[in-house]
Image (tube, rainbow, N blue to C red):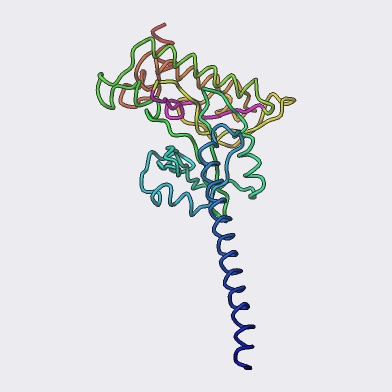
C-alpha cells in the first residue's frame, strides 16, 4: 500500500521534472537560435545600417581562415580576405602598430570614421577591440588598388585602363577627398593619398581607403600639427619643414597622383637619372 502511494507521488514528480527540463531545453535552444539568427541578420545588413559592427577576435579568425589569405601589407598592418556568414566578402586589416590610446578612444575614432558614407570612400563595416587586438573590417574591393592599373610594370599594357576610365577615376577620387575635407562634421586629413590607398571595385569606381594615418580635427581648426609621416613622393612641402598640416597637404598628394595617372609612371623612380627620378622636377623642367 505504501509502495503504491510512493509511486503516486514519485511518478508525477518525475514527469513534472522531465517536462520542466524539456521546456527549459527548448527555451535555451530557441534563445540561442534567435541570437544566431539576429547575428546573421546584422552581419548581412551592416553595410546599410550605418554604425560599424563589433566583432570578436575569434570570429574574425574564423572568417579569415586564421588570417591566411593575405591581400597586402601597409605601414600599420596587414590586410586579409574574409567572408561573413552570408558569403559577403570583406577585407580585414590587422593593425600591427596599435596607437597609444585606450579601447574607448579607439572605438570612438572607429565610429567617427564609420559614420562617413560616400560612394567614393571604402565602407568601414566593423572592428575588433579585444585585449591588445585592433582590427578593422572593410568592404572587399575586387579590383584591388589603383597602382595595379596605372603602372605598366605589373602585367603589361593589356591591364592598363583607357583615358575615359582614367578621367572618371580622377574626378571620383577628388569627390571622395572633398567629402571628408568639407562635408563631414569632423574635418579629416587623410595624410597619405597615393595609388595604393585608392581601391577600385568591379566597375572601376574608385574609393579612398586606409584612414590609418588620418587625423581628425574640428571645423574651428584649419591646421593640425602631426608627427605621422606620409609616403615619400607625395609629401607636401610643409611636411618637410615641420609646419602645421592643413587639408591642402592632401591636395598636393592628389596632384602627384594625377601626374602618375597621366604619365603612367611613379613620381619617385630611382631607376631614372639624377635629374629625372622625381616626377615633379621632370614635369617642371619639360614644361
Residue extending farthest front: 1
**How many marks do you count on the picture?**
0
Residue 77 coordinates in the image, percent (x, y): 46, 43
Horizontally, is 98 left or right of 66 in the view? right
Q: Quadrant of the C terminus?
A: top left
Q: State left or right for residue 287 relative to residue 10.
A: left
Query: Which span is picked out in magenta?
Result: 187-202
Q: Residue at x 62, y 73 (%)?
A: 16
* Residue 274 sits above or below residue 37 on the image: above
Look at the picture and state if 267 lies above or below 58: above
The answer to if 192 sits in the magenta stretch is: yes
Please name whichever residue, 60 or 243, is drawn nearer the observer in this view of the structure: 60
Q: Is the N terminus in the top left, top right, bottom left or bottom right quadrant? A: bottom right
Residue at x 39%, y 39% (from the top left corner): 72
Residue 69, position as x, y percentages in the image: 36, 44
The question of residue 102 being in magenta is answered with no
In the rendered view, tell whether residue 57 sits above or below residue 243.
below
Q: Position of residue 193 (x, y in %)?
A: 50, 26
Asked if residue 154 lies left or right of residue 236, the reply is: left
Residue nearest the observer in this picture, 210 or 46: 46
Q: Is residue 20 left or right of residue 94?
A: right
Q: Residue at x 38, y 10 (%)?
A: 164
Give the residue at x 39% y 13%.
165
- Residue 235 horizontal/vertical position (percent): 51, 26
Q: Residue furthest right?
A: 220
Amino acid at each position: 500500500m505504501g509502495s503504491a502511494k510512493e509511486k503516486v507521488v514519485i511518478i508525477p514528480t518525475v514527469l513534472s521534472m522531465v517536462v520542466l527540463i524539456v521546456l527549459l531545453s527548448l527555451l535555451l535552444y530557441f534563445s540561442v537560435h534567435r541570437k544566431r539568427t539576429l547575428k546573421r541578420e546584422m552581419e548581412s545588413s551592416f553595410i546599410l545600417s550605418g554604425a560599424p559592427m563589433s566583432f570578436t577576435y575569434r570570429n574574425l579568425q574564423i572568417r579569415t581562415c586564421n588570417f591566411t589569405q593575405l591581400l597586402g601589407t601597409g605601414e600599420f598592418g596587414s590586410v586579409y580576405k574574409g567572408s561573413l556568414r552570408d558569403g559577403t566578402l570583406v577585407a580585414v586589416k590587422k593593425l600591427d602598430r596599435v596607437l597609444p590610446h585606450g579601447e574607448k578612444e579607439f572605438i570612438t575614432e572607429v565610429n567617427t570614421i564609420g559614420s562617413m558614407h560616400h560612394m567614393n570612400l571604402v565602407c568601414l563595416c566593423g572592428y575588433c577591440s579585444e585585449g591588445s587586438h585592433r582590427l578593422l573590417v572593410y568592404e572587399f574591393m575586387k579590383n584591388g588598388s589603383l597602382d595595379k592599373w596605372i603602372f605598366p610594370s605589373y602585367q603589361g599594357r593589356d591591364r592598363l585602363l583607357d583615358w575615359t576610365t582614367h578621367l572618371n577615376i580622377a574626378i571620383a577620387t577628388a569627390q571622395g577627398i572633398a567629402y571628408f575635407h568639407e562635408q563631414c562634421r569632423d574635418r579629416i586629413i587623410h595624410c597619405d593619398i597615393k595609388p595604393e590607398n585608392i581601391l577600385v571595385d568591379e566597375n572601376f569606381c574608385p574609393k579612398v581607403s586606409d584612414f590609418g594615418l588620418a587625423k581628425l580635427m574640428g571645423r574651428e581648426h584649419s591646421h593640425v600639427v602631426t608627427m605621422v609621416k606620409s609616403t615619400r613622393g607625395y609629401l607636401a612641402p610643409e611636411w618637410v619643414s615641420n609646419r602645421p598640416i592643413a587639408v591642402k597637404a592632401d591636395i598636393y598628394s592628389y596632384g602627384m597622383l594625377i601626374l602618375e595617372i597621366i604619365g603612367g609612371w611613379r613620381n619617385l623612380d630611382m631607376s631614372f637619372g639624377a635629374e629625372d627620378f622625381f616626377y615633379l622636377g621632370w614635369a617642371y623642367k619639360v614644361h
